[in-house]
Structure formats: C-alpha cells, structure tokens
Image: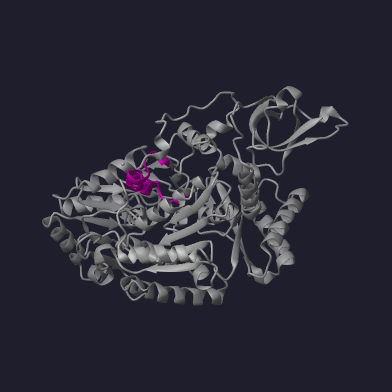
Amino acid sequence: MTLVDVLLPLPLEGKFTYILPPALAIDVRVGSRVIVPFGAKRQYTAIVTAIKEEDVDDLKKLKEVIAVHPDPAPAVTPDQLTLWTWIADYYLCTEGDVLRAALPAPLLHPALRKRPRSKRKADAQGESTTLPPTLTPAQQQAADALREAWTRRPVALLHGVTSSGKTEIYIHLALDAIAQGRQVLYLVPEIALTTQLSDRLRRVFGERLGVYHSRCTDVQRADIWLRQLSDQPYDIILGVRSSVFLPFQRLGLVIIDEEHENTYKQQDPAPRYHARDVAVVVAHHAHARVLLGTATPSLESYHNALTGKYSLVNLKERWGAVLMPVIEIVDIRDLRRKHRMSGSFSPRLLGALRETLERGEQAILFQNRRGYAPMMECPVCGWVPRCAKCDVSLTYHRRLGQLVCHYCGTAYRLPDACPACGETHLKPLGLGTERIEEELHALLPEARTARLDLDTTQARDAYEHILDDFACHRTDILIGTQMVSKGLDFAHVSVVGIMNADTMLNYPDFRSHERAYQLMAQVAGRCGRRDRQGLVILQTKTADMPVVAHVRHYDYPTFYTEQTDERQLFGYPPFTRLIFIYLRGRDERRLTDASHLFRSRLDTLFNPTRVLGPEAPAVARVSGLSIRKLMLKLEPSYSPSVARSQLRQLLHDLNAEGALSGLTIHFDADPM
C-alpha cells in the first residue's frame, strides 16, 4: 500500500501519514501539494515529504489523501524541505510553523484551482532598458577584492562607508553570477528600500528582476513562487526577509544589504528566524556565494570577519570623493536649562534648516518614536494613562485625538480629566514624529514637510508616494523614525537632524549602544551624497558618552573594540549564544511558579552559571498575558544541537507533568 508522510501548516511536531489512493499516485511526488482531512471536519493543503510502500494492519487508523493540486511540478523542492527542517530545529519551533511562514497563502488554500501567472513577453528573459555605470577605481578595487575573497571563503563582508556606491558593486557582481547561468537573491531590510531599488535594478536587469515582499498581494507572491519553479524563473529576486523561503534552481549569489539591521529578525509569530543567517545556510546548500554589505556592521558579523570565518573588504571612499558629513554635537540639556530651545529644536538645528531652505536643498529629521508624545501625564498628581491589556503607557496621537498602545494596538479616548485628581490639562511628555512635524510647521511655515513612520505608511502605496515626493523635491523636510536611516539615497539632502539621541542610548539592553551607533551613523549618511559635504546636528543630553564621540568621528573599529571587550567580560554575543525562553499566561501565580520550576530544571541541565532569570521583561504584560523571561547563555564549546535537544525534551517533560497547563511557551534563539 502506498503511504505518504505530509507536513501540515499547523504548529504541531512531526509529520502525519496518509493513504495515497492508486488513482492519485501518478500525480504525487515529494514536494507536491495534497489535500488531506485533519480533525473532525477540517481539510488542509499539506506538503508531501515522503512516499513509501508499507503494509498497514489497521486501515481504520489512517485517512486517505482527498486530492492532489494540479501543479505542473512539486510546489516545494527537496532543498527547501531540508532548509525547513533546519530552521525548525535551530529556532526551536515546528516545521508546520515554517511551512506557514514560507508558502504564500494561496498555495495553502485547500481549494483545487490554478493560480494566475503573470503575462510577459516571450523574450523577456533576455531583456536588459541600460548597462550599469562604470565602477570608480575604489569600487572596482573592492569588487575585485570580493571576487578574490570568494576563492578562499564563501562569505564576505563589505564594510563600505555610506554613499560609497555599494549598490553599484552589488549590480556588477550580480551580472557576473547571471552571466555564469546562476540566480541572485538580493535582500534588503525594509520595503521602503525595494521602492528605490526596484526601478534602479530594473534599468539593468529588465524583466529578469522579480520583487517579493509583504506589500505584494497574496496572488502576486504565489505567482512569483510558481515562476521560480518554472523553466523561466527570475534571474534576480529583490526582496525582504521572507524572500529567503523562495525556491531557487541555480542560486549563485546572495546579497544581504544593510546586514546589521534587526528587521531581518522575525519576532512574532514563529519561526523567529534571522533572514541573514538563514540566507547563509541557503547559500551553503546551493554552493553559492554570500555578500554582506553595510556601513555599520553588526558586532557578530565583524567578529566573524576579524576571526577568519568571513572575508573582510573595506571601502572607505565616498562616491565622487565627497567628504563624510560633519557631525556637530549639541548639548540640549544645557540649552534647556538656559531656555534657549524652540520646542524640540536647538538654535543650531533651526538655523541650519533655514539655511537649507534658502539654498533650495532638503533635510531629514530623525526621531525613533512615532506619534505625538510617548506618554501623557497629569501635572498635578503624576497619573499616566496606561493600556488595560499591556504593561505600557499609552502614546498620544494628536491627529487621531487618541491614546494608542503600540503593543496591542488598542486605541483609547483621551480623558477629559485626570481620574485621580480631576486636573483637566494633561501634559504630553517626550517627543514623537508627529510632534516634531507640528513644531516645525509653527517654526518654519514655508517648509513643505512629510512624515515617514508606521502611522503614515499604512496604505499599500504610501511608502512610494512619500519617497517619490521627497525624491522629486515636492517635500523639503522629511521627518521619520528608523525608516529614514535604511539606505535611502537622495541627491539634495544637505542637513540631517537627530532630534534626541538619548532614547536610543538609555534603553536597558546590551545591544542598545550598538543599535544607537548604527542608527545615528546610518541616518547621518543620508546627507551630502553628491557634490558637497553634508551637515549632521546631533542633539543629546549625554554628549559625553563614548558612543557619541565614536559616531562623530566615524570610528567603528574603536567602537567595536570597546563593545566587544565589555561583552566578553559579561558573556554576551559574539562570545556566547543566547536563547530566550518566554512564558506567558493570565494566571500570575501559575506563571510565577512555572517560571521558577523551569529555571530549576534548566539549572540541572545546563549549570546555574549559564542561566539568568526568571524576570519580568521591560514590558511584562501584553494583550492581557503576563510574561516571564529566562536567558540561557551558551559558550561556543557547548554543542548547539545538544542544547536544543535538551530544551525540547524539557518542554515535553513539563507539559507531560501538567506543570505548564494554561501557559504558552516559546524559545527565541539568537534574539535581537
């Protein structure tokens, strides 16, 4: 009897076995989509992972495959199934979690129908609208160094200053790979970057370029997936982190731009994978080369380069030999004491913006908080509105006239009076992008402004409209969160204002200074990218912090040395591997007891010196669920596979004992 093992898009461990009727057997291969019953009345599209001939003693224990999707070829390749198994094992989740994240939704629909395919010219595969620009001597030297480095190691880190022309190098190396009959995966951390890059890449690669991200419709994503399985796949895919799941038949090069960005890490739901690290595994299986590019490397990648795991290539010259922007530090603590601030603007920043407008140039203002103010406070008794479901203060959105929780999304009406003392005038505390925009309108009414943050980019084409208006100089000043720091290229930006660096510097996390350095250095690099040196005004109350000096002098090596010395002393990456264990539940007492029991078992398995917690995280309740966190630190000599096996077994044992009843538990390997 023919049986098939299938993978279901459900968070369940293991595969499930079904009888394959003879009438369907001719259409089924490993990777095929089949429709199977599961539970009392549900049907799911599942992926066949194995076909076998076995005798079955009790046929009543097995159900039959209902139907086979009419795909011309299996929807999932063997290499992808291997990758999914690795992801589930490494990131401590189920293969069903990975399947659900990887496959576009239409391909998981149990209805039997073919998905539409994009229409294109018969000769589109060979099209190419211009040739790429000739590389400068510095760029050519870097490209040649990368080609040579790949003869020794498959992964190379390109540490190139902002506006050094890394994208042009990527294009030339992608053309090399395509000329050799190979495919290219070009990863970027944000959808906003695909907006600028797609037009630029399409001028070179024509219809050989596919773009894949979450703003594509489900049908568009399914269409790209199926085309990658066809005999005329895209030669190059530009996409965000989910692109690592696409099928490739002859992958030769993986480019990971802005490799330091934490948005490459999936947070919720599972799988909590890091696209950069998964892409390296994908490339390894395909015998492809990997190029990591950034002006501000992650400490882990730079450590890998210095210790010989990766090759390192430096590009220290900006395109056109333009000097790096001058960074001026403004101590706003002293200015506030002297009452010399105009709202959130120092005299120096306000003057620089006026001069920019007079010259007909543009500016970017960066503040890594959206909304009008991070919190409201009663000036009499100190009462602060908080979310009823989450352990956080509510952010005030003035245009909406609402208080919003940025964790669960619940909106609340702004109270007419303080419920504690009756005071009718609540005071906004802190600085958000909406407040900056309002203040700027009052101070520089002639300036045309726009905001780029999560609030202004909800519509499908909002990114494109905002960036296009700024690129075409229909906007003078762009105000934004970290979205404005991620590799955007604008010709006429001469001034960047970092409104308040302290919210980044004072965050209670061992990566806070690394992220602050990266954000400030990256946003500084958005100005002076063509024919004149730019100016950055960095406003802070902690001007004496070493990281501020490192940003000012673009001194990444010293910054790296200081940070790694500290991390080595306290046992943090890149000198250890971290696994966070999160427990969530509504019953606070049960949660506390379970978290301490989990800790005691971890101590037995791993030694107490490797375990921290349990503790309540910075946000200890989200959507009505209280949270506890444990941290496991593993030195490089401790086998990761053994550790993961021990954690899975521990979770299984505690569930079997009923100790985790009513709670949800998940692991986060290599957390950000």
- Please count the marks in the image: 0
| Magenta stretch contains residue 24 | no
- Work out whether residue 370 can be spotted: yes
Q: Nearer the viewer, residue 540 or 28?
A: 28
164 vs 276, left or right, is left
Q: Which residues are magenta?
A: 185-209
Residue 139: where, in percent of width, then height?
34, 63
Q: Nearer the viewer, residue 543 or 405?
A: 543
Give the main secondary structure of the magenta stretch: helix
Residue closest to the far left: 358
Q: Quadrant of residue 338?
A: bottom left
Q: Quadrant of residue 80?
A: top right
214 vs 574, left or right, is left
| 586 up-or-down from 2: above or below | below
| Magenta stretch contains residue 191 | yes
Residue 320: where, in percent of width, then height?
24, 63
Residue 86: where, in percent of width, then height?
64, 51
Residue 577: where, in percent of width, then height?
60, 65
Residue occupying image coordinates x 58% and y 48%: 271
